[in-house]
Amino acid sequence: MSNTISQNALFDVAARFQIGGTLDRVEPFGSGHINDTFLVQSVGEGVQLSVLQRINPMVFPDAAKVMRNVRLITESLSNVPMGEGRECLRLIPTTSGGYSFEDADGATWRMYHFVESSVSHDTAASPSVAREAARAFGVFQRTLMDFDAGQLVETLPDFHNTPARYRQLLDAAQRNPLGRLAQCLDEFNFIRARSESLDCLVRLQEKGAAPVRVTHNDTKINNVLLDMVTGAWKCVIDLDTVMPGLSLYDFGDLVRTATATAPEDETDLTKMDVDLSLFEAVAMGYVEEVGVRLTPAEQEYLVESGRIITLETAMRFLGDYLNGDVYFRVHRPNHNLERCRAQLALVERIEERRGELQRIVESALHDSRRSR
Ligand code: ADP
Ligand code: GN1
Ligand code: MG
């Protein structure tokens, strides 16, 4: 979509928001799979940057509810001091006083202040990047522990309900609308062979062993901005999926994206592994911030959450491949299948290294108890 919107249309939308100066440039920005994101440059007394986003209406049919959640969370976080150099996303109001603008096609747009001097990473190049990302999401979760999750609308019901995601995959395979199932039988069977274990997080919730908290639900590493100079975490972004959820969803997605040795869509599967020093950094960073607040079951299932969320994401990519690439933005034919394969390779590596990963988690938990 981002490359089919004309410059004039983008300027018209950007002008609906209260940015100072004269609009100068609007360009596609970032590597998110869902929304259309643009960097807006305006020139007044100095150069000002803002981030304009068109909320994906296919993914979020009720954008007003998404914006309500985002406003509640940004307002709540803005009242909590995050520490030197840290910030939370800040919405820019529209010229008519709200925080979003609906275009003639019914799509909703919003604008954020650009987080200056920051970078986002698609993979963790070093343990310090992994640790900072984990700390950022740990602080995010801890800060929102007193926020009443009941205030938030579940805009994407069953977002991390892994058995429900599996049923959606089975349905896509059965319908097989484009006849693509023959191209992905190995991947489909790999997932099917693991179907018995898919309900483990859901069961923890049902038993009350893992409480429902306010979670981010999309803690992939490029959803945290790090300081360009110091490398310290600066801002948690992409708040559209903040909903009631389990802490293990957030830890699991961190494992998937911040401990992997290769990008999410790596085609050379020999490059994909879970890096033990990145994993240690993620475990330490997260446990430092929230470890002592986690229940025994949450602590026990940290490693398993990484495996489950990686498998769940692979199922979602495969389902979208079968359905004709209608959900995740793709950049080449078979992109979703390639993403699925890379995620399944990571699942296998996590399974092989389960014992070592468990020891790392236990040691991080042990250290955090001692330092209390
Ligand atoms: P998506 O839902 O499509 O993933 P995101 O909200 O994550 O969209 O934004 C896409 C990318 O844009 C991010 O990965 C980040 O690089 C960049 N980005 C988003 N918001 C900001 C911001 N306020 N300041 C700086 N960069 C941002
Ligand atoms: C999407 O929006 P983005 O690119 O940060 C997706 C996540 C997936 C991720 C896989 C709302 O995240 O759930 O884990 O792609 N977001 C939504 O890369 O579905
Ligand atoms: Mg994102």
Image (cartoon, grey):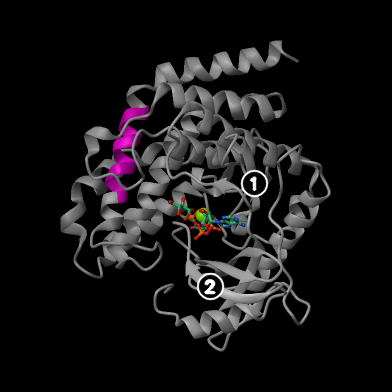
Check the image and name the residue furthest to the front.
Answer: 45
User: Which residue lies at the image location 56% right of the left edge and 37% below the top edge?
Assistant: 133
User: Which residue lies at the image location 66% right of the left edge and 37% below the top edge?
Assistant: 208
Q: Mark 1: is the Cβ under 8 angstroms from ligand 1?
A: yes
Q: Amino acid at mark 1?
A: Cys
Q: Quadrant of the N terminus?
A: bottom left
Q: Is residue 93 visible?
A: yes
**What is the CA distance from the residue labelled 1 to the residue labelled 2?**
24 Å
Residue 255 image point, x, y percent: 47, 34
- For this view, does 173 lie left or right of residue 302? left
Magenta region: 339-350
Taking depth in this image into account, of 336 and 155 the one nearest to the observer is 336
Task: Return the residue at label 1.
Answer: 235
- For this view, does 71 lie left or right of residue 230? right
Question: For residue 25, which numbered disc appears in the image?
Answer: 2
Up the image or down, 299 lies above or below 115; here it is above
